[in-house]
Amino acid sequence: MNAYSVEQYVKDIRAVVSEEHEIDAISQRIKPLALRLASDPSWFQDKYRKVDPDQGVGLHLLHEEENHDLAVFVIAWAPGRGVDAHNHKTWAVVSGIEGQEHETNYVRLDDGSKPGFADLKATKEETLFPGTAVCCRPEDIHSVRNNGDQIAVSLHTYGRHLNHTGRSTFDVEAKTETPLILKIEK
């Protein structure tokens, strides 16, 4: 099989998005493309394993459209680190490249009408490994943690750049919701 580049991946995603209008159809068609790119080592660089020591995670932007739609990242997770419960407010497809990342999914019990308040309940847990992928809807809430002893690396594709969606992070115990912006490596 020929090498699959980030550029070809982006071109293929643009075609999918132009043909589909339902979020589930978009993400299900992108999922095999993400798995293909994640399994092809030809484009991967060592710098994608870099983790910001303060965040415990390194976000490496591979592609972003001028209007902030369609963003592709490689995300590296330090062992034992991750991101607390959060939403994306856009569709997402995540595929494992190296290591493992553990996801806990949540359901929101309140109606979201009280600013700064969120009552969440954990519903499902799974661990993402190389060769596996998951899809997220805009309203999905999950936490991600590297539960291995090595750096974990995954490919993340979003319908809109994460720092342009108005997404939130949640403290499950304190029942709070606050804006979430993460530092991006260029």
Image (spheres, grey):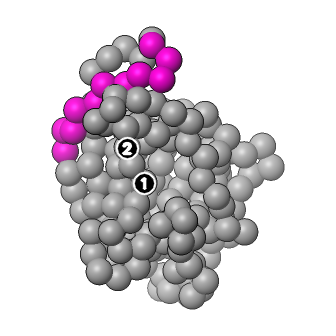
Is residue 13 toward the left or the right of residue 164 in the image? left
Q: Which residues are magenta?
A: 114-124
Q: Is 113 a magenta residue?
A: no
* Count of numbered labels shown in the rendering: 2
Q: Secondary structure at mark 2?
A: strand
Q: Amino acid at mark 1?
A: Val
Judge from the rendering whether residue 94 lies leftward or rightward of residue 130; answer left or right.
Answer: right
- Can residue 54 be seen here? The reply is yes
Residue 41 versus residue 94 in the image, above or below: below
Q: Of the numbered discs in the image, which one, if any, rests on residue 37?
A: none
Task: Give residue 148's position: percent from left, percent from top.
Answer: 27, 75
Q: Nearer the viewer, residue 90 or 175?
A: 175
Rendered residue at 60%/53% (across/down): 182
Pointer 1 local density, CA inside 10 Å: few below 14, some 14–19, many at least 20: some
**Which residue is painted at 37% across and 38% down in the image?**
171
Q: Magenta stretch containing residue 121, yes or no?
A: yes
Rendered image quadrant of residue 85: top left
- Using the rendered view, name the quadrant where residue 153 is placed: bottom left
- Label 1, label 2: how many angstroms apart (C-alpha)? 7 Å
Q: Amino acid at mark 2?
A: Ala
For image coordinates 52% across by 62% down, the residue present is 55
Percent from the top left, x then y, of residue 185?
67, 67
Disc on res. 85 = 2
Q: Residue furthest toward the right?
A: 66
Q: Which residue is mark 1?
A: 83
- Secondary structure under tag 1 reads strand
Q: Position of residue 73 (x, y in %)?
A: 58, 63
50 vs 61, nearest the viewer: 50
162 up-or-down from 166: above or below:
below
Image quadrant containing the C terminus: bottom right
Pinpoint residue 164: horizontal percent, then vertical percent. 67, 40
